[in-house]
Amino acid sequence: MGRGEKTIIIRDKEIRMSLRGAKCLLSNSDTKHIRELYDYDCFEIFPIQAKRTINSDSAGRGNVSEVLIKNWKSSGK
């Protein structure tokens, strides 16, 4: 099973948990694929910058773009 398949399985489990009323929050890379995968009314996506201090390539260290994905709506308060 590849990474793409695992990502779909996680998304599908989040949808099932949403239908049961569970609140879920996850983070993932900010890519077009992830944004399309979670393009459902039950999800809200928030872009963030995450700091990476460990990487075999020093050029890969520093801030990276990620998204937080949650399955509940903010009350606006």
Image (cartoon, helix red, strand yellow):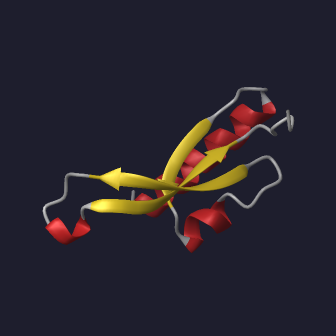
In-image side of 75 versus 23 (left or right): right
Q: Position of residue 8 (x, y in %)?
A: 57, 55
In-image side of 61 versus 11 (left or right): left
Farthest-out residue, front: 77
Which residue appears at 37% of the width and 60% of the height? 63
Q: For the N terminus, which image quadrant?
A: bottom left
The front one of 17 and 26 is 26
Q: Position of residue 13 (x, y in %)?
A: 63, 40
Which residue appears at 78% of the width and 56% of the height? 40
In the depicted structure, whether residue 60 falls above or below residue 48: below
In the depicted structure, whether residue 30 falls above or below residue 43: below
In-image side of 69 versus 3 (left or right): right
Q: Position of residue 52 (x, y in %)?
A: 29, 53
The front one of 68 and 22 is 68
Which residue appears at 49% of the width and 58% of the height? 66
Q: Position of residue 36 (x, y in %)?
A: 66, 68
The front one of 16 and 66 is 66
In the depicted structure, whether residue 16 falls above or below residue 29: above
Which residue appears at 75% of the width and 35% of the height? 18
Q: For the C terminus, which image quadrant?
A: top right
Q: How many marks?
A: 0
